[in-house]
Amino acid sequence: MNNSEESYKKDSMMKDAFLLLSSRKISSTWLDHEKPYTALEEECKELMRDLKFVSDLRKYLDNKLYISRSVKMLLTYMSMSENSRWQETPEWMHPVTTKGWYLIRWIPTALGIDGPIGRFLLRENSPIYPRLGNNIPLITAAKEFLYNKDFKALRNGLAHWSFDWEISTDNIYIVIYKEGKDSILTKMSINEVNGFHTITFGLTEILDSVFFKSNLS
């Protein structure tokens, strides 16, 4: 697959993922973009032409070596988990292995966003933070996407194992509970959770390839 085909595939996957979240009424310039993956990647590359930013980024990452290390391990893990096949387990195990297949994909992504990726985009000491705004609209939109109320509840529920499965005749849902309580924070279909997962995994790939790996070269 050449670069053009790969870019088209990633843009299509991200657009489809945003469509899965249409009922969440997420408004975003990133969501509305015809090429959400490619456009965000190009905006990040453009920022790397700012020598002051590159200097600030290098200092930031030199003091936080765990970021590049954590993201590398996350992407390594995900490359293996994507190749797991619940269909290859005995049929009587499918109700359990199907759930496990989803969880081994979702949980690391949630932890990564609440860990190194979230800190890089959301914390005031990050070199990205003071530059957020109209000059980098897609990066800013990606940051705002991480603040989505339902997405934050989903990440916290997965990270603290405060969730359950609900199976109906027409769909499968993840029910997120307040930590240590029985009150429901949000409920979403597995397609919606997959949408959040696909978008944030794509975001992680972009940040790693443009910012984190560039800093190591």
Image: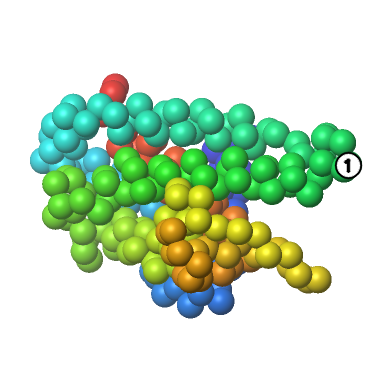
Q: Is residue 18 visible?
A: no
Q: How is the image coloured?
A: rainbow
Q: Residue furthest right?
A: 91
Q: Is residue 103 visible?
A: yes
Height in image: 137 above or below 62?
below
Q: Residue furthest front?
A: 181
Is 57 on the left-hand or right-hand side of 202?
left
Q: Residue furthest top?
A: 217
Residue 82, percent from left and from top? 64, 37
Residue 215, percent from left and from top? 26, 29
Residue 191, percent from left and from top? 64, 61
Check the picture and name the quadrant holding the N terminus.
Answer: top right
Residue at coordinates 61% horizontally, 59% vertically from top-left? 164
Q: Nearer the viewer, residue 164 or 56?
A: 164
Is 185 on the left-hand or right-hand side of 171?
left
Residue 11, percent from left and from top? 54, 53
Q: Amino acid at mark 1?
A: Glu
Height in image: 186 above or below 60?
below
Residue at coordinates 18% horizontally, 27% vertically from top-left? 62
Count of marks placed on residues: 1
Residue at coordinates 29% horizontally, 22% vertically from top-left? 217
Q: Residues within 10 Å of mark 1 (few under 14, many from 20)?
A: few
Considering the numbered disc 1 on the image, is that residue within a helix, a strand or a loop?
A: helix
Judging by the rendered image, the residue that carries numbered circle 1 is: 91
Residue at coordinates 34% horizontally, 43% vertically from top-left? 115
